[in-house]
Image: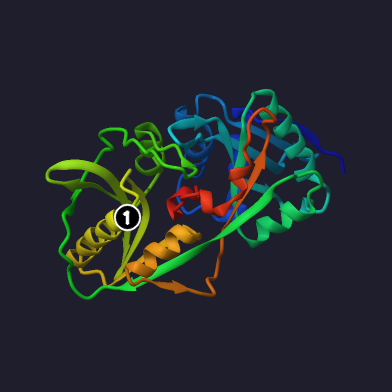
Amino acid sequence: MTYKILPYTTHYLRPLSSLLHDSFDIKTRDKEQFVTWKYFDSFHNNKTITYIALAEDGRVASHYTNIPIPLYRNGSVHQSMLCTDMATARAHRGKGLITQLSTNVYKKVIHNNYDCSFGFSNSEGLKIDKYSHNYGYTIVAPFSRYFKPLIRKKLTSYVLHPTENFHEDIPLTNDYWRIYKSTDYLTWRYLDKPTNDYTIYTIEEHNKIVGYVVIRFSGIRCYVYDIITPLNTHEQMVKILQSIENEALIRKKRLIIYNVLDNTYWKTLFSTANYFNKKNNSITYYLTVKTHSTQKDLSSLLDSEKWLLMGGDII
């Protein structure tokens, strides 16, 4: 069988949505709305790079996408791309389509002067990384899950207040790589996502907003997806964790759960705050990185100790 490798256009939205649904079981009712939000929302400013492989019957047999998600470190924004949800229909696997598609995507990424691409792969994704020739991603580290049974409220100077909007950019200044979380990004990621079930809070101290937290409640569980704040010392963060625990108890939740890219920062924080590390998770995600720029020293991108990432960063 021969395949046509070509850039995506809106003409292929329906067959691309069908491929993604068959591959990942998209939960939202309107599959095309979800795909449009994730890859082609106005937030991306038409900078998404997607290539598809068309089979002889006109169906999308495979696709590969990078979306523009800037990274932030030490007060500087770095232009980067997020590799998302590559997929090949089962009948067309083993034909080298991902290699062909990724080659086209990264030619354009490099031409557009992006510093790097990064992604979040599960075990199946790592197999693609391994067997796709010249793919070039480095596995940085896995995500780990931390949890804590909730018993009683703690005294802390921070309090949470529900909010329907991200009101202002929160300045983040430290030596860690992280996604650049402007209000535009946060609005797209958490508020504009179709059928989202997140609850958003401001973190406040003495009636001053010092950050945001994104939570999902389910049964007796409280899943913390994101904490956006410049208050990153362990002393400050322990108090913020306690404020989140207090809100979970008000909501009658009995278990709080975090998913983070594991490193010394998180291990020390969760140990100090009396959390447990859950082993043997059914799905483990890994941060992977591919550098493009030869003009900048980006070696720190490959060091897990230089990242601060949470479960909400996995899009």
Whether residue 48 appears in this view of the structure is yes
Which of the pair 147/154 is nearer the observer? Answer: 154
**Coloration of the structure image:** rainbow
Q: Establish if 93 lies above or below 280.
A: above
Per the image, label 1 sits on a secondary structure element best described as strand
Residue at position x 55%, y 66% in the image? 283
Question: In this orientation, which residue lies closer to the viewer: 2 or 161?
Answer: 161
Q: x and y percent of residue 251 in the render?
A: 20, 64
Identify the residue at image location x=47%, y=41%: 179
List the residue tagged with mark 1: 215
Q: Is residue 84 visible?
A: no
Rendered location of residue 193, percent (x, y): 40, 42
The answer to whether 310 appears left or right of 282 in the picture is: left
Percent across and percent down for residue 14 are 59, 38
Say whether residue 148 is left or right of residue 285: left
27 vs 162, nearest the viewer: 162
Q: How dense is the environment of label 1, judged by Cα within 10 Å: few (below 14), some, or many (20 and up)?
A: many
Residue ranking furthest to the left = 206
**Rendered image quadrant of residue 234:** bottom left
Asked which quadrant contains residue 291, the reply is top right
* Whether residue 300 is situated above or below residue 125 in the rendered picture: above
Quadrant in which the N terminus appears: top right
Residue found farthest to the right: 1
Instruction: Please provide percent x and percent y for residue 7.
Output: 69, 29
Q: In the displayed structure, does residue 193 sit left or right of residue 261?
A: left
Q: Amino acid at mark 1?
A: Ile
Going 50% across and 43% down the picture, which residue do you hit? 177
Q: How many marks?
A: 1
